[in-house]
Image (cartoon, rainbow, N blue to C red):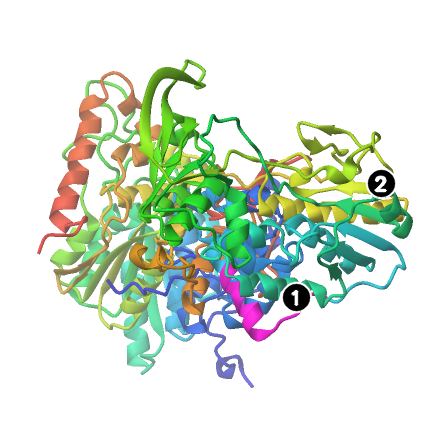
């Protein structure tokens, strides 16, 4: 064969004298490095969910749903519940809010939670049996989370619950229009299938006896006792605790409250009570709150939903007297520090009943006379790291211990308590939570995220809401859940968009294939920084070159 | 616009690729086994947009021509930084003759291939603004006028950069270069001079003229693909920020291109037979300062006395927005 007959190479081979011989990497003063930073959503999630991770699996569609769900239940065994009742601090932290609207993380969690229930996915199998026995006192979110995580670690777990059914405030505090009971029951049953034994109607009254029976005890009794305020009241006046009303409704015997109901307080329980009163037939439900809307502890969406259902709010007001069909309220004003003070100006309001929702206290009856267990500010004090109370082997988590009183926080603290108990039983010290770097919004190049507004869930119209306890907020279907998940910007973690690979002027980045990301060829990378500047999610750092 | 629109998959059409994309929706540059026609080891400055644009253009052309592509290159940065004797960074067959004649060389290659019956082998000519707008203009114009079967690509970095940043006729008014210093009552490149090569190309009424930037890969790839689907004279003008000559950070080459488009300073268009056919709309209208301020060649615009020149830039952007309807809405 002569040179003339040689097949054409069509130019796609490099000759013997290629520029590959010259290593331009020596020019570099800064080098790009791939990093994995913590996204604000996960940092804000009290349950400790790897939100970016499970949204990432959801993005793949049908094939990724089960993986996504498994990534949730690695932290939180109640996704269908929390997908409904969580106040989603993750979404308030979401960087996408600065681009268009936050990612609807909560809606996707609910979709995955509901899909898991529909398809009967089971929680992970427990680890090898350790032979150790742990008692969890109380079956609210903290107790269930503690029990589940202890069970995964191979321990035998018994949960003792004073009430007739498990779930704590999720069952007896949160109305069914926010959390249908069959959803709660199904997720609790699934925890029981891991081998956790829940004994209802069993109040633990003797801590010493419990300690003798078990290797360790975790107190998760919650804060189910209504806080009281002194209001001068006539003999025939009807003053009841809001949480008692919610419990009665949950137990299937709703109380008669009358036509006009006043609710005293500004928290989520007050909102739940007012909305429940409307459903029980009250034509007027007035929330009396002593501060302003900005200061109200109730979640803004709860307030909006309540107002949407015809609940009225009497701002800057306290109840100073209650009579049979009227209440007296005093107008308040705020001082320079934002504290309310009475103005001496009074007003009468019609009300057949007053529901007190001015706070809840921990049920500490079990600890009476246990002087080695410190109680202050109304809660059981625990060591921040070990979560142990003053008594060795006795731990506490959830509303009974210090911290935010939300279900998501309770789940996160429950998981940590489980790890703490496990460390104690194995005579190890639980390592402190690692310090992580946050993927802040200023690291992102949001140009690359196409405008894609949040997929809003359908709501039951207000007129139909107040006639019953049907769930208000609908779920997303698979298509919308996947779309919503794909709105995640994957802050601080490479999601393989190919920008660095495609935009390197020096052809110095190699693409390693699906899931394998990229590799920088430092023999040729000149350190221009384009890859870092154009990385949508801020997953590349430029660091000084040290020679 | 011939730009593809892919479904929203975390990122939309603006990123290079994405792990969720269907194979058909992928850009040439997103493939692990892309041609990489301009390979590593070339000596372009850090952050050189010309090197980036040349790989994007040529990889797409190689892909469209099924690997059968011959390239003629004018003198300029692109030639100098890629072919330091005895090395070459080019993978396709590539020839450099002299400064002015890339278009003529390409015409000769195309004619020869046609005479041999090898019409499936395609010809691409390329150069910088010096080799195209100034020194090589006669040959380019002749190639256009004869409608020779060549795709001519101009990488416009608005000056003679490898010889020390002298002004070209593509240098914008008020820009500081080595030959137009920022001194006197009208500092920088003179106002009222210079020429627009895309408009000159359109005046030849050749089959296809387009402009593009390195801020929009998919737009650029689709324009090269469109050009490659046509026989006859075609012209593609790519704005390529030059960190050295423009006095900008090497990391900002893409961002500057984006700002040029989003401020209305650089119009991204397509024209067929002399008629404007497509315009890329501004996505997020940006002030001209986004484009000008990061560049040291415009530093005097932001000092006392620079107000008039800055205002001229605003008027230029407004004129482009009007002329090309860059914000849309004009029926």
Residue B300: give x, y in percent of width and height: 29, 22
Query: Horizontally, is B234 left or right of A324 in the view?
Result: left
Between B285 and B298, which is closer to the camera in this rendering? Answer: B285
Q: Which residues are magenta?
A: A110-124
Q: Is residue B211 above or below residue A538?
A: below
Q: Residue furthest top?
A: A336
Q: Chain of mark 1?
A: A
Q: What is the magenta segment's predominant secondary structure?
A: helix
Task: State the image coordinates of residue A338 (x, y, percent, origin top left).
Answer: 43, 19
Looking at the image, which is closer to me, B22 or A387?
Answer: A387
Q: Are marks 2 and 1 in contact (CB under 8 Å)?
A: no
**Residue at image coords 41%, 13%:** A336
Residue B97 appears at what percent x and percent y?
A: 37, 57
Q: Which mark is residue B244?
A: none
Above or below, B219 against B282 in this view is below
Q: Examine the rendering and report whether any part of residue A105 can be seen.
A: yes
In what element is the residue under mark 2?
Answer: loop
Q: Which residue carries the number 1 mark? A: A189
Residue B4 in which image quadrant: bottom left
Relative placement, left or right, of A103 versus B1 is: right
Question: Which residue shows up at 56% across the image and 31% down it?
Answer: A228
Nearest to the eye among marks 2 and 1: give it: 1
Instruction: Tell me if residue A51 comes above or below residue B32 in the rendering.
Output: above
Q: Does residue B162 appear anywhere in the picture?
A: no
Residue B233 figure quarter: bottom left
Indicate left or right for B43 with A125 as reference. Answer: left
Residue holding disc 2: A429
């Amino acid at each position: 064969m002569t040179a003339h007959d040689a097949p054409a190479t069509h130019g796609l081979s490099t000759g013997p004298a290629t520029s590959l011989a010259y290593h331009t990497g020596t020019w570099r003063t800064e080098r790009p490095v791939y990093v994995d930073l913590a996204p604000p959503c996960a940092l804000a999630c009290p349950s400790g969910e790897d939100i970016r991770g499970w949204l990432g699996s959801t993005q793949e569609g049908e094939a990724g749903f089960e993986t996504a769900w498994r990534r949730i239940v690695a932290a939180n065994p109640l996704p269908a519940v929390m997908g409904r009742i969580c106040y989603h601090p993750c979404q308030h932290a979401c960087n996408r809010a600065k681009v268009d609207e936050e990612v609807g993380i909560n809606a996707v969690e609910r979709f995955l939670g509901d899909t898991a229930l529909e398809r009967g996915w089971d929680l992970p199998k427990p680890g090898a049996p350790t032979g150790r026995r742990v008692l969890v006192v109380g079956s609210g979110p903290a107790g269930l989370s503690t029990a589940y995580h202890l069970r995964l670690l191979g321990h035998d777990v018994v949960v003792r619950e004073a009430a007739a059914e498990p779930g704590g405030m999720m069952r007896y505090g949160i109305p069914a229009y926010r959390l249908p009971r069959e959803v709660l029951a199904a997720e609790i049953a699934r925890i029981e299938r891991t081998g956790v034994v829940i004994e209802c109607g069993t109040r633990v009254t003797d801590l010493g006896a419990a300690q003798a029976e078990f290797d360790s005890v975790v107190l998760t009794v919650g804060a189910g006792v209504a806080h009281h305020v002194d209001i001068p009241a006539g003999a025939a006046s009807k003053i009841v605790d809001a949480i008692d009303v919610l419990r009665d409704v949950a137990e299937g015997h709703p109380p008669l409250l009358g036509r006009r109901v006043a609710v005293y307080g500004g928290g989520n329980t007050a909102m739940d009570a007012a909305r429940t009163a409307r459903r029980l037939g009250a034509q007027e439900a007035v929330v009396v709150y002593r501060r302003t809307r900005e200061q109200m502890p109730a979640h803004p969406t709860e307030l909006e939903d309540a107002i949407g259902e015809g609940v009225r709010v009497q701002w800057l007001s306290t109840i100073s007297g209650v009579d049979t069909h009227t209440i007296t309220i005093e107008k308040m004003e705020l001082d320079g520090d934002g504290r309310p003070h009475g103005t001496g100006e009074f007003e009468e309001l019609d009300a057949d009943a007053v529901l007190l929702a001015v706070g809840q206290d921990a049920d500490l009856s079990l600890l009476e006379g246990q002087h080695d267990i410190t109680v202050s500010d109304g809660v059981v004090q625990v060591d921040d790291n070990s979560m142990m109370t003053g008594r060795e082997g006795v731990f506490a988590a959830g509303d009974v211990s210090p911290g935010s009183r939300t279900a998501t926080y309770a789940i996160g603290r429950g998981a940590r308590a489980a790890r703490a108990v496990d460390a104690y039983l194995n005579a190890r010290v639980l390592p402190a939570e690692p310090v992580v770097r946050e993927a802040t919004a200023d690291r992102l190049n949001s140009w690359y995220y196409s405008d894609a507004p949040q997929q809003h869930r359908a709501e039951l119209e207000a007129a139909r809401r107040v006639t019953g306890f049907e769930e208000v907020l609908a779920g997303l279907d698979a298509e919308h859940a996947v779309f919503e998940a794909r709105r995640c910007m994957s802050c601080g973690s490479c999601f393989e968009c190919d920008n660095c690979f495609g935009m390197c002027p020096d052809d110095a980045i190699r693409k390693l294939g699906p899931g394998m990301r990229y590799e920088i060829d430092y023999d040729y990378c000149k350190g221009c920084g384009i890859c870092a500047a154009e990385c949508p999610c801020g997953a590349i750092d430029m660091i000084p070159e040290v020679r | 616009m011939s730009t593809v629109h892919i479904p929203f998959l975390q990122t939309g059409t603006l990123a290079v690729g994405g792990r969720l994309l269907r194979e058909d929706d992928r850009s040439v540059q997103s493939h692990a086994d892309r041609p990489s026609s301009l390979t590593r080891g070339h000596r372009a400055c850090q952050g050189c947009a010309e090197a980036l644009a040349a790989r994007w253009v040529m990889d797409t052309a190689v892909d469209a021509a099924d690997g059968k592509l011959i390239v003629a290159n004018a003198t300029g940065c692109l030639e100098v930084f890629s072919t330091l004797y005895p090395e070459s960074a080019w993978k396709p067959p590539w020839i450099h003759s002299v400064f002015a004649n890339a278009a003529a060389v390409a015409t000769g290659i195309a004619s020869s291939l046609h005479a041999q019956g090898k019409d499936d082998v395609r010809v691409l000519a390329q150069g910088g603004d010096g080799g195209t707008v100034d020194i090589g203009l006669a040959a380019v114009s002749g190639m256009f006028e004869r409608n020779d079967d060549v795709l001519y690509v101009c990488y416009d970095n608005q000056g003679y950069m490898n010889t020390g940043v002298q002004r070209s006729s593509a240098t914008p008014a008020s820009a500081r270069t080595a030959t137009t210093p920022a001194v006197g009552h009208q500092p920088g490149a003179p106002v009222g001079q210079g020429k627009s090569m895309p408009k000159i190309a359109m005046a030849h009424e050749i089959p296809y003229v387009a402009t593009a930037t390195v801020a929009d890969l998919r737009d650029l790839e689709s324009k090269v693909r469109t050009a490659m689907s046509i026989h006859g004279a075609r012209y593609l003008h790519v704005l390529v920020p030059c960190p050295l000559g423009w006095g900008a950070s090497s990391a900002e080459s893409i961002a500057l291109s984006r700002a040029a488009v989003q401020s209305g300073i650089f119009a991204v268009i397509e024209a067929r037979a002399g008629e404007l056919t497509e315009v890329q709309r501004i996505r997020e209208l940006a002030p001209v300062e986004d484009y000008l301020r990061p560049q040291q060649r415009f530093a005097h615009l932001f000092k006392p006395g620079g107000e008039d020149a800055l205002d001229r830039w605003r008027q230029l952007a407004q004129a482009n927005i009007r002329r090309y309807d860059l914000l849309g809405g004009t029926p």
